[in-house]
Amino acid sequence: MPLPLIPIITALATGGTLVPHAAGGMIVTSTAGYVAGTYLSTSAITGLLTGATATVGAGIALALTSMKGLMGATLARTAAPVVATTTATTVPSAATGVLGFLTGPVGIVLAVVGAVLGIVYGAYRIFMLNRKLADTPKDEEVQFTENEAKIVEGIIKKLAEKPENRMS
């Protein structure tokens, strides 16, 4: 079944939002109500999320690899100043106070760990949505939540971006 993405992307670009439909599935709504021609059935959402799941899995692997490399580089970079400060008995002014803590190696590691946790949580939400779709009998519509509609809307908006504007 082809996905009706062009009218959905157009409606989202003009200020609409994707919401759960009363009969199951999702539809774009605007200030005037439901937008005609923008209904997404459960099977269409399943097809849309199949591609997103592979992308998220690759993104998590890349994020974890980047985190490992960044943390290793940060810890290696901080080892030299510690040795230098013990021999010179001076502490650089940037390494003192709250600003030094947040911009130093601990702050960088905390930021990376926070980013990875955010990515993993997003992947978990997509996994749970895929599981909900897989557990649904064929030819039956699923009642989605507002959060699930936001996830699918984000995926559609990401697909609508021009390739040169995409970060991933």
Image (cartoon, rainbow, N blue to C red):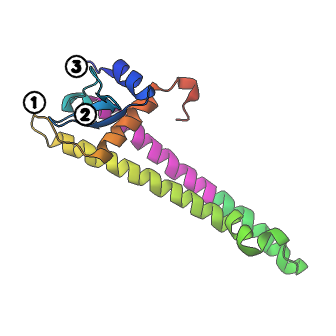
Q: Amino acid at mark 3?
A: Met
Dividing the picture into quarters, in which one does residue 151 lie?
A: top left
* Image point (30%, 25%), residue name: 35
Residue 110: x, y in percent? 58, 64
Apparent side of residue 110 relative to residue 60 in the rendered image (left or right): right
Q: Secondary structure at mark 1?
A: loop
* Callout 2 crowding tier (Cα within 10 Å): few <14, some 14–19, many ≥20: many
Whether the magenta-drawn stretch holds residue 17 is answered as: no
Mark 3 and mark 2 lie on one chain; the one further toward the N terminus is 3
Determine which residue is flagged by label 2. Answer: 26
Residue 89: x, y in percent? 88, 81
The answer to whether mark 2 and mark 1 are in CB contact below 8 A is no
Span highlighted in magenta in the image:
47-71
Q: Amino acid at mark 1?
A: Asp
Image mark for residue 108: none
Q: Main secondary structure of the magenta part?
A: helix
* Image point (49%, 27%), residue name: 161
Determine which residue is flagged by label 3. Answer: 1
Q: Secondary structure at mark 3?
A: loop
Q: Quadrant where the N terminus lies?
A: top left
* Image point (46%, 57%), residue name: 117
Mark 2 and mark 1 lie on one chain; the one further toward the N terminus is 2
Mark 1 and mark 3 lie on one chain; the one further toward the N terminus is 3
Determine which residue is flagged by label 1. Answer: 139
